[in-house]
Image (spheres, rainbow, N blue to C red):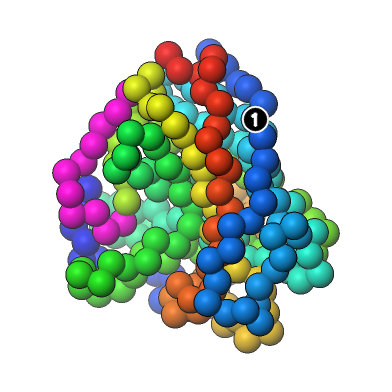
Amino acid sequence: MRAPLRHAGAWCAALAIIVGCTRAVERSANPEGRVAQADVELKVESVSSGPEELAITYAVHNRSSRALLLLDGLPQWGPSGYVGVAPERAYVDLSGEGAVLLRALIPVPEDIDVEAPELPAVSRVEPGATASRRLSVPLPLRTSMPYSNGPEVTRELSAVRELRLRVGYLPDTGDVRLHGEAQALGQSYRTLEYSQAVSRQQLLDSGPLALDGVKK
């Protein structure tokens, strides 16, 4: 685990099962920018595990009349700091008996000081379009959160009672300030400002994902 104080970086034999889908959970402080829950859908298509990783493929369907910005371009870190966008990375929260995989902005806790927040880059989903994505995390699962001060938890997949996926997004309103551009696995990513992301982010929650046939 890295210490909470950090720079955000240069951007200032597998078994698969079909699982369900969910609608958006609204958590927006900006009513003008809201998209109706029925207009955004997260569908988890498969959950698979191998000797070294847990992988999830999913799709976000944008049935609204405005573009969405997915906060799914988590940063990749190397020995010298930020090295780029990690398009398949996810945060891992093992604070309860289950596991939550997050591809979203994690707000900076009020009791922690940072030089700059860890801010995911965003990918754009046009109105009427579907974004197909894949994430993978190493096994056994280990706590991987940007501002955790507690002990690192390690958990075998067989011990996970409940698995969830959460994906952050915000509507691309006319006043969203986007910066730069980077490519990763053929996907274009841009950055936005933390203040806009933290106040407007909405979350899609998969609900409990079936693990029958996946646990080893």
Q: Residue furthest bottom?
A: 175
Q: Is residue 154 above or below residue 188?
A: above
- Evaluate whether residue 192 shows in this view: no
Instruction: Determine the main secondary structure of the stretch shown in magenta.
Output: loop
Q: Which residues are magenta?
A: 146-156
Residue, x 23% and y 37% (percent of image)? 153
**For residue 109, what is the image quadrant?**
bottom left
Residue, x 67% and y 26% (percent of image)? 18
Q: Is residue 201 magenta?
A: no
- Evaluate whether residue 68 shows in this view: yes
Task: Please indicate whether residue 14 sits to the left or right of residue 93 in the image.
Answer: right
Amino acid type assigned to the residue bearing label 1 in the image: Val
Task: Please indicate whether residue 93 sits to the left or right of residue 40 in the image.
Answer: left
Q: Position of residue 125 (x, y in %)?
A: 71, 61
Residue that label 1 marks:
19
**Quadrant assignment for the C terminus:** top left
Residue toward you, 150 or 137? 150
Residue, x 42% and y 57% (percent of image)? 75
Task: Please indicate whether residue 72 sits to the left or right of residue 45 in the image.
Answer: left
- Helix, strand or loop at label 1? It is loop
Q: Is residue 17 above or below residue 92?
A: above
Residue toward you, 82 or 90? 90
Q: Position of residue 38 (x, y in %)?
A: 75, 57
Q: Position of residue 196 (x, y in %)?
A: 50, 79
